[in-house]
Amino acid sequence: MKNTKAILADQSDPLKSFRDGFELPANVIYLDGNSLGALPKSVKQRVARTISEEWGEQLIRSWNSADWIHLPQRVGNKIGRLIGAAENTVVAADSTSINLFKVLSAALDLNTERSKIISEKENFPTDLYIAEGVARQIGKGHQLVLADTPDDIANMLDRDVAVLMLTHVNYRTGYRHDMAAITQAAHDKGVLVIWDLAHSAGAMPVDLTSADADFAIGCGYKYLNGGPGAPAFLYVNPRHQGAFNQPLSGWFGHRAPFNFETAYAPSTGIEQYLCGTPQVLGMVALDEALSLWDNVDMEALRTKSIALCDYFIEGIDAFAAEYGLTLVTPREADMRGSQVSYSCENGYAIMQALIARGVIGDFRAPDIIRFGFTPLYLSFADVEKAVTILKDILKTRSWDAEEYRVLGAVT
Ligand SMILES: *Cc1c(COP(=O)(O)O)cnc(C)c1O
């Protein structure tokens, strides 16, 4: 039986028409758009057309006739509008990990007198692994130093810190940093700041320009719905463009790739952060998925995201203590992104039981069940149903079955 509150909230939802733009399987409540966004219907046709007409018929001519060559810039500019970046300060390319390698290398080279890179223990591991790799490969005695908690960061910003590298919204807990305040505090100490927007782009309004961020990176396949392994993006503040040669000096970053010159001469624009040939099919899917955002009011998106998360938390509050669920996401909306996570015993099995009932979230080791809320295709009725199913699974202990203990390669 649907609850009146959910019905009313859905009726007055200004974003409700966007759900129709997505291919969503029947009987699935998809709470994992923070990990792999759902498929926008128009992407199917666009990719099919690209394959049959542009690749199949036009062949190599499509680099010009379909302007494949400028997809990284075109897609980058579409993403830029969602994250408060000026035209030609964002490109779509490669993966988030690779883009971090490029911008972290650039940042270190802009702050050569200093030796520390600061991040957090709780940051997404690939960001920390890449920082280790950068320090090893191109660093000059650089050292990666990790904060235990977000509150420790401000005190660690001394005159020996070159770069502060943070993920805006934590992948596990959903904790959200105050981007503007932290960037300001870092700049006051001469520290450059890199923001990873993997869980922010398309999840909330972001304003890199007003925060005066130095660099940013992020994912195309999460809230931006670009599809599995979609190209990622990177942002470089215009004041740093052309100031440094990023180390992956491939021909697409050259100022004139089709002059085929022997020596590398970097573009002075954002193109310098490209490396090799763009992944056209993935770019086209992401480009099409981004067209959905043309009419999205980002403030309305954030308002709905907060309301969906609040509604979920409220529903679970009624039985969390009884079944040992501990909310690890901040209750204060201002301090969180667009996900809600709980730590609990048997989290993996509980999540598998939920998925078997059509409620798809995910599990993050060691003990977190995680639910992402994507305002473009979720309703309050979905949230209510997910809460009801979770309660039923806990009450009946249906998760306590052999089949739900088998670990997949991806959790
Ligand atoms: C998802 C995610 C990534 C993923 O990086 P890939 O190179 O695309 O695999 C990186 N950083 C953060 C913070 C993420 O959440």
Image: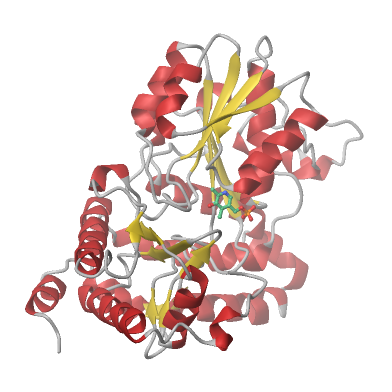
User: 326 above or below 247?
Assistant: below
Comparing 331 with 74, the one in front is 331
Q: Is 169 positioned to the left or the right of 117 in the image?
A: left
Locate the C terminus by quadrant: bottom right
Residue at 52%, 81% in the rendered image: 45
Q: Is residue 302 left or right of residue 171?
A: left
Residue shown at 35% from the left, 34% from the top: 178
Query: Considering only vertical position in the picture, is 403 above or below 250?
Result: below
Residue 325: image location, x then y, percent:
34, 64
Choose between 44 and 11: the one closer to the eye: 11
Is residue 305 placed above or below 399 in the rendered structure? above
Q: Position of residue 375 (x, y in %)?
A: 30, 65
- Which residue occupies the foreground of this view, 136 or 232? 136
- At 46% from the left edge and 25% from the top edge, which residue is drawn? 153
Residue 284 seen in the current view: yes
Q: Is residue 272 visible?
A: no
Query: To which quarter of the image does residue 231 belong?
Result: bottom right
